């Protein structure tokens, strides 16, 4: 039986080290499930709060996929190709801007293996716990400018409308250096596919515009009580 899951694809590579395979799959399973789902929830929320951005993403998806009419959602999803996803710079920027404001892991802790000195001169000792906060850092004006608390995907685009990444030591949601998230590219691909399909076929609005939407205090940044939205079919053109 031909299977298309990620584990089967890894097993098809003959020279895959078993320990590397084990660690990778555990990482995908443990770190990629709730984080991706939470990010997509916040993404839909931000699109509902910024309908102009939602429409821009929908137009870009339509142009990138050259789809004039979508008769079947499953068929459209199956037709998505890497070439089309690579053209969706605005979608990539909108997802990244969501992650900046609502990182799936709002706080991240590290334990020191040995005495060390941080770049700012602060000394740490072996077994000290250091916690940094991507959630707070994404809102700091001295890092992102006076509009740090605004949802503005354009900050991630250059003058030609191409996605422009930032240093992972500035945009810390996926960590940086040797500890950078192994599933970063995989997570982006998942979210772009899912978002492209939904926004090509539906328009989203909050069920209750007056209901406060906030987060639950957990390891991952989930929406408290879930996100309640209404989905409307897009025009079949």
Image: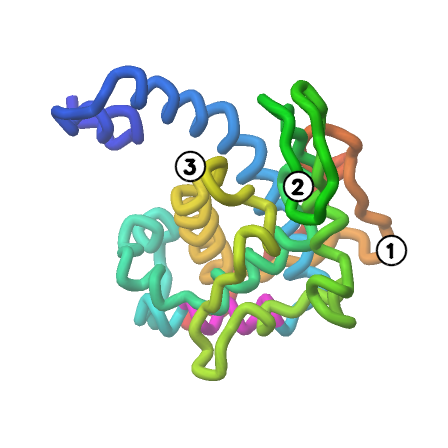
Residue 25 figure quarter: top left
Identify the residue at horizontal 75%, vertical 57% (top origin).
Answer: 139
Q: Is residue 30 left or right of residue 139?
A: left
Magenta residues span 53-61
Viewer-nearest of labels 1 and 2? Answer: 2
Q: Residue beneath label 3, please?
A: 182
Mark seen at residue 118: 2
Mark seen at residue 80: none
Is residue 226 visible to us here? no
Residue at the bottom extreme, as displayed: 159
Q: Is residue 36 left or right of residue 117?
A: left
Disc 3 from disc 1: Cα separation:
38 Å
Work out whether mark 1 precedes mark 2 in sequence or the reverse, and give the earlier one: 2
How many C-alpha atoms fall within 10 Å of the one at disc 3: few (<14), some, or many (≥20)?
some
Disc 1 from disc 2: Cα separation:
45 Å
Q: Residue beneath label 1, please?
A: 210
Is residue 99 visible to us here? yes
Viewer-nearest of labels 3 and 1? Answer: 3
Q: Please say if 19 is above or below 210.
A: above
Q: Quadrant of the N terminus?
A: top left
The prevailing secondary structure element of the residues shown in magenta is helix
Disc 2 from disc 3: Cα separation:
24 Å
Identify the residue at horizontal 66%, vertical 21% (top origin).
Answer: 126
Colouring = rainbow
How many C-alpha atoms fall within 10 Å of the one at disc 1: few (<14), some, or many (≥20)?
few
């Amino acid at each position: 039986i031909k299977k298309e899951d990620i584990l089967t694809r890894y097993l098809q590579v003959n020279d895959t080290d078993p320990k590397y395979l084990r660690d990778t799959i555990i990482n995908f399973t443990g770190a990629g499930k709730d984080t991706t789902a939470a990010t997509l929830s916040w993404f839909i929320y931000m699109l509902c709060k910024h309908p102009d951005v939602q429409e821009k993403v929908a137009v870009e998806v339509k142009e990138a996929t050259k789809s004039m009419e979508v008769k079947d959602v499953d068929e459209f999803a199956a037709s998505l190709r890497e070439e089309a996803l690579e053209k969706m710079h605005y979608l990539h920027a909108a997802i990244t801007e969501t992650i900046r404001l609502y990182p799936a892991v709002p706080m991240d802790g590290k334990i020191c293996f040995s005495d060390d000195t941080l770049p700012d001169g602060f000394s740490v000792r072996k077994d000290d716990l250091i916690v940094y906060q991507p959630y707070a850092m994404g809102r700091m004006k001295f890092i992102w400018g006076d509009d740090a608390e605004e949802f503005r995907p354009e900050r991630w685009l250059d003058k030609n409308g191409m996605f422009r990444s930032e240093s992972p030591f500035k945009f810390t949601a996926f960590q940086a250096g040797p500890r950078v998230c192994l599933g970063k590219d995989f997570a982006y691909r998942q979210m772009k596919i899912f978002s492209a399909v939904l926004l090509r076929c539906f328009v989203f609005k909050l069920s209750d515009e007056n209901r406060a939407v906030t987060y639950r205090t957990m390891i991952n940044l989930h929406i408290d009580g879930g996100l309640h939205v209404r989905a409307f079919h897009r025009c079949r053109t």
